[in-house]
Each structure stands twice: as structure tokens, then as C-alpha cells.
Image (cartoon, rainbow, N blue to C red):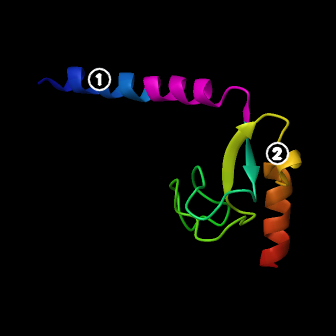
Amino acid sequence: MNKQLVASAALAAVMAAGVVTPAQAAGKEKCYGIAEAGQNDCGNLAGTHSCAGQSTVDNDPGEWKLVAKGTCHDLGGLLKAEAKKKHQQNKG
């Protein structure tokens, strides 16, 4: 396989991944503090992990799940800016 073909395939894969992610998240927002242990959607605010399903406690304010836009507060959660502020206060 030539290098140009490999580079083109890699670029196409990266571009496709970038297109799929926003489409999946359309109408959704990150809601912090509502994920049960092992049910988070991705990395946390503390930076101790970067994958889904790795939260260790229920309702950790640094862990998030995608929810329908406008429903986070109804679920008892925090939006990202609020969660970051709370996380910083808890660190210091």
C-alpha cells in the first residue's frame, strides 16, 4: 500500500468521526452529577479517566451523561460551567 493511500484513508476516518459525533449529540447536552457508578458517558472533570463507564460512585459532580437539552437541572444535575466551578471549589 502506498503512503498517500494510507494517509487519505486515515484522514477520511478522522473526518467521518468528526461528522458523526455532533450528529449524535444534536439536541443533547452534558449533564454533570447524575451518572450512576459505571454509567458515565466519557472522561471526567478531574482527568482521572477518559472513557465511558469508568465512574466509581453515583452522582459524582465531575462525571457526566448526555441528556436532552434543557432537562439537566430537572434531573438534579449541573451544566458544564456550574460543574467546573464546583469542582474548582472542592479542590481548593
Q: Residue furthest bottom?
A: 92
Name the residue rendered at 60%, 55% in the picture.
40
Relative to the observer, which residue lies in front, 28 or 44?
28
- SS under mark 2: loop
Is residue 25 covered in magenta? yes
**Closer to the observer: label 2 or label 1?**
2
Q: Position of residue 17 (x, y in %)?
A: 46, 29
Q: Position of residue 75 (x, y in %)?
A: 83, 49
Query: Which corner quadrant of the image does residue 6 belong to?
Result: top left
Relative to the observer, which residue lies in front, 69 or 88?
69
Q: Left or right of 70: which side holds 52?
A: left
Q: Of marks 2 and 1, which one's residue comes earlier in the chain?
A: 1
Q: Position of residue 36 (x, y in %)?
A: 65, 61
Is residue 31 covered in magenta? no
State the separation of the CA atoms marked 2 and 1.
38 Å
Relative to the observer, which residue lies in front, 31 or 15?
31
Residue picked out by circle 2: 72
Q: Can you say whether 78 is above or below 88 in the image?
A: above
Q: Can you say whether 1 is above or below 79 in the image?
A: above
Please identify the quadrant where the C terminus is shown.
bottom right
Start and end of the magenta stretch?
15-28
Residue picked out by circle 1: 9
Name the residue rendered at 83%, 53% in the picture.
78
Query: Which corner quadrant of the image does residue 62 belong to?
Result: bottom right
Amino acid type of the residue tagged 1 in the rendering: Ala
| Disc 1: CA contacts within 10 A as few (<14), some (14-19) or many (>=20) | few
Amino acid type of the residue tagged 2 in the rendering: Cys
Please identify the quadrant where the N terminus is shown.
top left
- SS under mark 1: helix
